[in-house]
Image: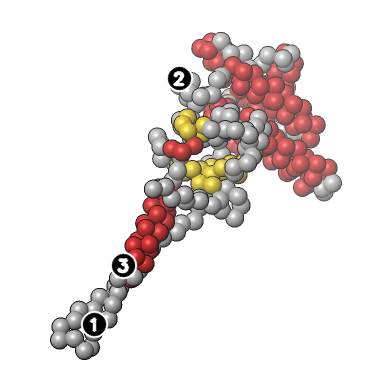
Amino acid sequence: MEIPVKIAPDEGGYTGRECPTCEKYFKIKFGTGLPSASECHCPYCNHVGLQNVFWTKQQLEYARSVVLNQISGDLLQQMKRMERRPDPNAFISIGITVKGQPTPIAYYTESELEERLTCSSCTLEYAIYGAFGFCPDCGVHNSFQILNANFDLALKVLDLAKISADEIKSKLVENALEDVISSFDGFGREHCLNLPGKLSFQNIAATKEKLLRENGIDISLGLNTAQWSFVCEQFQKRHLLAHKMGVIDDDYASRTGTHPSLIGRKVVITESDVRILIENLQVVGQNLVKGVARS
């Protein structure tokens, strides 16, 4: 006997999935992404298996309860046909009464997740906890996609700065610089998670040397000496903003070649510099993606 059970998507069109290996929960929107994706990738641990092994515990419990509800309901109906009242005229008569309810259905609702994404490679719409993960359809890691999305937000902040008062403009440009570098640091850490040792991209010059020395990856490919020096200088400016209220100190002067007479003054950050930095970091990010396979 086969009893079909439909697992309906939530109001947003997403269907819950649960990895059979790490048992973490995510959601996908069937009908988006690859047209005939029979396999599913866990966005967290990248376990790959057929779609039919990614049912959640709640979905399986619901399916069992639907089947039991139907079977028990049919059984009760059959037994009720056997009901009879005792014969009041008979010396001895036995009546049969059937009582009971079908097994209740264990309804459930899909959980809300923190991040909704659309894969830039296969267009699958999916939702996960956190931010970074593998696409459940094509398996591509989304770290570079999220980096570019954060860069787009920074560019919108810079557009807003253009039409803002001077004191607000300055703060928006500073915030954009900090956001761009923080986003790149988060991307770099996540994308290099499987490499031995911990990497921090806040000191991008030191990280470049480490990756080149230990992994043969040159993240500055495509940038000339002046462009790479510019990138390193902007990272140093971000350090001043975060730790020195933007005031130039001896360390910044020695690292960037700034004239000692400027020590104690506020560092200058321009809108155009942040835009150029984004362009250069997109090149650096592509080098990282090509050099480090995320699996």
Q: Amino acid at mark 2?
A: Pro
Q: Residue at x 59, y 16 (%)?
A: 291
Earlier sequence position, callout 2 versus callout 1 = 1
Q: Residues within 10 Å of mark 1 (few under 14, many from 20)?
A: few
User: Could you tell me the amino acid type at mark 1?
Assistant: Pro
Q: Nearer the viewer, residue 18 or 37?
A: 37
Q: Amino acid at mark 3?
A: Met
Residue 86: mark in rendering: 1
Q: Nearer the viewer, mark 3 or mark 2?
A: 3
| CA neighbours of label 3 inside 10 A, class few (<14), some (14 to 19), many (20+) | some
Q: Which mark is residue 79?
A: 3
Toward which corner of the image does residue 264 lie, by quadrant?
Answer: top right
> Quick one: label 3 or label 2, which is nearer the N terminus?
3
Q: Is residue 213 left or right of residue 92?
A: right
Badge 2 density bin: few <14, some 14–19, many ≥20, Cα 10 Å = few
Name the residue at the bottom extreme.
89
CB within 8 Å, label 2 to label 1: no
Secondary element at image label 3: helix
The residue wearing badge 2 is: 196
Q: CA distance from mark 3 to mark 2?
A: 67 Å
User: Would residue 229 be seen by someone viewing this image from the given angle?
Assistant: no
The answer to which of 16 and 130 lies nearer the viewer is 16
In the image, what residue occupies the spot 23% across and 82% down? 86
Distance between the Cα atoms at labels 3 and 1? 17 Å
Residue 165 makes an appearance in the image: yes
Q: Is residue 271 above or below residue 66?
A: above
Q: Do labels 3 and 1 touch, CB within 8 Å?
A: no
Query: Looking at the picture, how far across and down is residue 163, in whole percent?
Result: 84, 46
